Image (cartoon, rainbow, N blue to C red):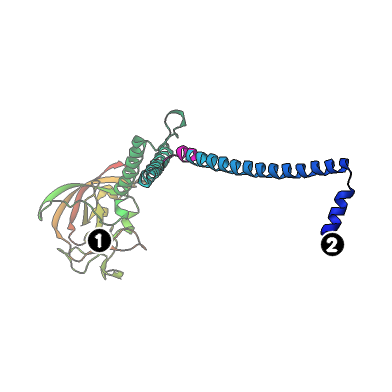
Amino acid sequence: MAKKSEEKDKDEDLSPEDEEAADEDSSDGEDDGDGDEDEDDDGDGDEADDEADDEDDDEDDEDDEPEPSPEPKKASKKTSKAAGAKSAGKKKAKAKRRPARGRGRPAPRKKGSPTRNIIFFVLVVGGIAAAFAFLGNQSGGGGAPKPKWKTGETVDVELTLVHTDRQNLACAMKDELKGRHCAFEAQNKRSSKSGDPTKNDKLLQPYTTTNGMQLMASGLWMQPSMVKDLPKSRFSVKCKFVVEGKSKAGYVRWKPGEGWHPGTGWFVGELKDCSLAKAQK
């Protein structure tokens, strides 16, 4: 009660001008409250508008997004690309392996001329054959042609010789054939009979003809034509050969100190009517 009486006393003390100013202040406070409410109303409207815009944007984004392609198709494209890449790689590798044509092609290696090789081969073989022909008495029987003579026949033969064959040629055989014998009864075992062909017309020695046939014969170095001076180089002699049989378990030697060669099955006989044919180069 005391407070109310004090407020009444204050109101009574205010002048008319002060009362008007107080009324204006109160009216302004009410207006401010209304403004705040309007601003709240405006805020609510703005939020509604923003929500509507967001929904429209979401719809637009959904429309703009591309439809996803099915996975199998992507896989097939990748597979085809990979296969294409592999095939391209293979083609490049093949292209590298292939020799370049035209100017880039490497020059072929020069090979020996076939004609030149054939000529060289013929010369070598011919030289070997000639060596055997001229030095027949210095080699074994080997693959010499076998004559088709018969026992009792007298055939013409041409022997190839050197003057040293007189003391170098020898055969080894235990058996005798019509009194004809070798200087050795066995290899490296001398016979008790004379081994000088210039004194013993029964002494057998191995010979080779100019056409490569081989035989054992006696009597050559006692022929009158063979007593004279003989050529220092290789020469040939033509004789009549009387076929008396074939050797058995025989061996031949072309020079002292060299090995023995098989001489079994050679024709054995006597040489006569010999004459110096010609000197050989």
Residue position for label 2: 2
Quadrant position of residue 218: bottom left
Give amino acid for label 2: Ala
Q: Residue at the location (10% across, 51% down)? A: 153
Quadrant position of residue 40: top right
Residue 137 appears in the rendering? yes
Disc number at residue 63?
none
Front position in the image: 66 or 141: 66
The answer to whether residue 217 is above or below residue 128 is: below
Give the main secondary structure, helix, strand or loop, of the magenta stretch: helix
Front position in the image: 127 or 39: 39
Residue 46 in the image: state x and y as whole percent. 60, 41
Front position in the image: 274 or 175: 175
> Which corner quadrant holds the N terminus?
bottom right
| Element type at mark 1 | loop
Residue 281 appears in the rendering? no
Q: Which residues are magenta?
A: 60-67
Residue 178 in the image: state x and y as whole percent. 14, 63
Which mark is nearer the camera, 1 or 2?
A: 2
Give amino acid for label 1: Asn
Structural distance between the alpha carbons of marks 1 and 2: 197 Å
Residue position for label 1: 200
- Residue 268 included in the magenta stretch of the image: no
Q: Residue at the location (35% across, 54% down)? A: 164
Residue 24 in the image: state x and y as whole percent. 80, 41
The answer to whether residue 161 is above or below residue 81 is: below
| Element type at mark 2 | helix
